[in-house]
Structures are given as structure tokens and as C-alpha cells.
Image: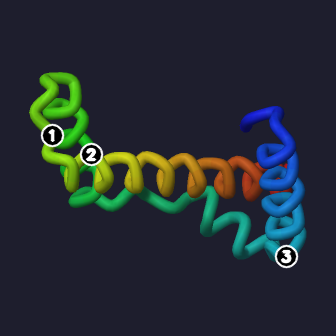
Amino acid sequence: MATTLAGSALERMLDSVAECFTPETSRRLAELPADPEVRRRLGELGERSSAGTLTPAEVEEYRTLVEAGDFIATLRLRARSRLR
């Protein structure tokens, strides 16, 4: 995560959320599989982004999906950490 003030605040917020995880919640989140349709769409948008052929709406969609994926990945890391 970023080391900016906003990044530090986000880290603290995510830590607070992770404090709420029960062992079962942590396990389920850590094992959560990626949605196949979302993965397909991300792949498609990624290829088109590399080719420079995304529409402005697709750029926003791609950015949103990547940011959401990063957020979920961060929560999954915290869930795994709580299981240790």
C-alpha cells in the first residue's frame, strides 16, 4: 500500500475491518475464488488496454475492476494473516 497519509489511513481502516474477522470469515475470505466472468473481462480489458483500444468508459471500468481487485486482495492478505 502507499506510504502517503491517505495510504496510512487506508491501512488503519483495513486493519480495523480485519479485527472483525472471525476465524470462519477469515478462512472463507482467504479461500474466495475469483469470479470467472470477472477474470475474463479483466483479461479482455487488459489486452485492449495494452493495444490502446479502450473507450473512455472501458478505461473507467478497467480501473474500477483493478482497484476493486487490489482492495479484495488486501483484505484476503489480512484474512490469511489472522489465520496464522
SS label for mark 3:
loop
Q: Is 68 left or right of 30, judged from the image as shown? A: left
Q: Is 61 left or right of 55, judged from the image as shown? A: right
- The residue under the point 65% across, 54% down is 76
Frontmost residue, 18 versus 27: 18
Q: Is 48 left or right of 64, judged from the image as shown? A: left
Badge 1 amino acid: Leu
Picture coordinates of residue 47, whole percent (x, y): 17, 30
Mark 3: few/some/many CA within 10 Å (<14, 14-19, 20+): few
Is the residue under label 2 in contact with that under label 1 (CB below 8 Å)? yes
Q: Is 57 left or right of 83, judged from the image as shown? A: left
Structure colour scheme: rainbow
Separation of marks 2 and 3 at Cα, in angstroms: 34 Å
| Quadrant position of residue 50 | top left
SS label for mark 1:
loop
SS label for mark 2:
helix
Which numbered circle lies on residue 59?
A: 2
Q: Which residue is mark 1?
A: 54
- The residue under the point 15% across, 40% down is 54
Badge 2 amino acid: Val
- The residue under the point 79% across, 48% down is 6
Q: Is residue 16 above or below residue 38?
A: below
Q: Which residue is mark 3?
A: 20
Badge 3 amino acid: Cys
Q: Specify which label sits upstream in the sequence, 2 or 3.
A: 3
Picture coordinates of residue 17, whole percent (x, y): 81, 69
Separation of marks 1 and 2 at Cα, in angstroms: 6 Å
